[in-house]
Amino acid sequence: MNKKFDYLIVGSGLFGSVFAHEAKKKGKTCLVIDKRNHLGGNVYCEKIEDINVHKYGAHIFHTNDKKIWDYVNSLVEFNRYTNSPVANYKGKLYNLPFNMNTFYQLWGVKTPEEAKNKIQEQIQDLNITNPSNLEEQALSLVGKDVYFKLIKGYTEKQWGRKATDLPAFIIKRLPVRFTYDNNYFNDNYQGIPIGGYNKLIDALLDGIETLTDVDYFENREDWNAKADKVVFTGRIDEYFGFKYGKLNYRSLKFETEILATDNFQGNAVVNYTDFETPYTRILEHKHFEFGNQKKTVVTKEYPQEWEEGKEPYYPVNDKDNNDLFDKYKELSKNESNVIFGGRLAEYKYYDMHQVIASALKKASDLI
Ligand code: FAD
Ligand code: UDP
């Protein structure tokens, strides 16, 4: 029987959209389905008060890979937004990531040498030679004061676990610098699509058939019958009927409000790094695009334990979950007609540029 499409793509996030775009370029036909009521996955923006609201949390595009930067810029123009979040610890403000501004605010030190000496003083009696968890990694990089004021509380509420039970790599995402530079990323390229992320998704999916509000699992056989191959970007454990058990995720709750002021906090992202404040950050969306609308829209981001029915935002890449994922990955090798990709199917803490790179590689290897 001739199937109608070459590819059924389950999930319209960046992985599915990039794969579909590449397939179309090579003359293949695709049907993209998503169970949400919109396209774009977690980069989707909702327009409120003429402001692009990052519905699933702050998304700042950054990459060091010129190919990826050129790729996204060929689809949509980016602005000059540079992420420089501010941390609020018990009412006092500190610059992020950890840099000379932060060290000056904490200790009054003015030179890199003074800052390094201060950190050295705070770590010398800890005897950490080979950091084996997030706490040890953070302490050995920045010392006790930064750790206790800016990392421990934020991290433990974000992940709902002790910092000693978390992998060290999570904190290595953040730069530590001995210059007065508040840029959150070290990458050469950074920005936000002018007009919001939906423009990027629209450009990727231009001319491709899409359906929203459809869950692949509700009618799996029918969907499979529509295409020769399936690209699956949902949860890999769900794909295999939880045969070995459920993978764990971290979820979030977003509380969004419109405020009758033009500027609430003067910055797109303010992190609340104490453990007691129940949210981790407040986003003020207009600042992602230098907006001058009359009102403003802010979102408080509350971390939550994931359970069925909530969005699985972050994979929990601890040893137990990674071992369980490896078992599903083994199973996936037997599915010769299915391509697994993206944050959920690869169970990886991917940023956008990494998801795009992964989709481009799979498309170039497999189509
Ligand atoms: P998703 O965007 O999750 O897309 C998967 C899609 O599949 C979803 O739309 C889902 O509805 C659909 N789906 C799942 N199961 C089914 C099913 N059974 N049937 C039909 N459809 C299904 N990255 C950055 O580079 N910079 C940032 O600043 C940044 N900030 C982030 C902040 C937060 C709070 C989060 C959660 C992530 C952030 N990221 C950031 C990461 C970024 O969101 C991801 O790398 C990227 O969006 C992942 O794309 P994806 O296609 O793999 O997954
Ligand atoms: N982090 C922290 N304090 C902060 C910001 C981040 O301790 O003010 C830690 C925390 O453990 C977090 C990790 O750094 O999970 C990575 O932060 P990032 O901002 O990259 O997280 P994401 O945007 O992916 O949620």
Image (cartoon, grey):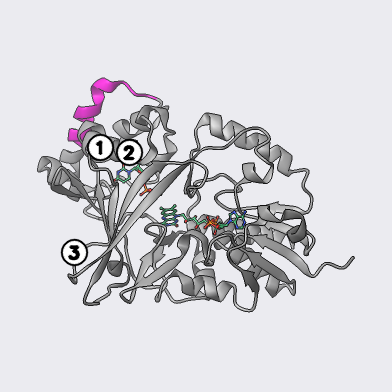
Indicate whether 307 appears above or below 26: above
Label 3 near ligand 2 (CB < 8 Å): no
Residue that label 3 marks:
264
State the image coordinates of residue 142 (x, y, percent, origin top left): 27, 36
User: Which quarter of the figure is the C terminus placed in?
Assistant: bottom right
Whole-angstrom CA distance, mark 1 to mark 3, is 23 Å
Q: Secondary structure at mark 2?
A: helix
The number of callouts visible is 3
Q: Secondary structure at mark 3?
A: loop
Can you name the residue that lies furthest to the right here?
A: 1
Q: Quadrant of residue 193?
A: bottom left
Residue type, label 3: Phe
Whole-angstrom CA distance, mark 2 to mark 1, is 6 Å
Indicate whether 124 appears above or below 34: above
Could you say which disc has been placed on residue 157 in the image?
2
Could you say which disc has been placed on residue 275 in the image?
1
Indicate whether 16 appears above or below 130: below
Say which label, 2 or 1, has the lower sequence index: 2
State the image coordinates of residue 328 (x, y, percent, origin top left): 67, 38
State the image coordinates of residue 47 (x, y, percent, origin top left): 38, 72
**Which one is in front, 98 or 17?**
17
Say which label, 3 or 2, has the lower sequence index: 2
The residues colored magenta run 116-129
- Residue drawn at the location 24% of the way across and 51% of the way down: 179
Residue type, label 1: Phe
- Residue drawn at the location 37% of the way across and 58% of the way down: 58
Q: In the figure, is residue 70 to the left or right of 85? A: right
Q: Secondary structure at mark 1?
A: loop
Residue type, label 2: Lys
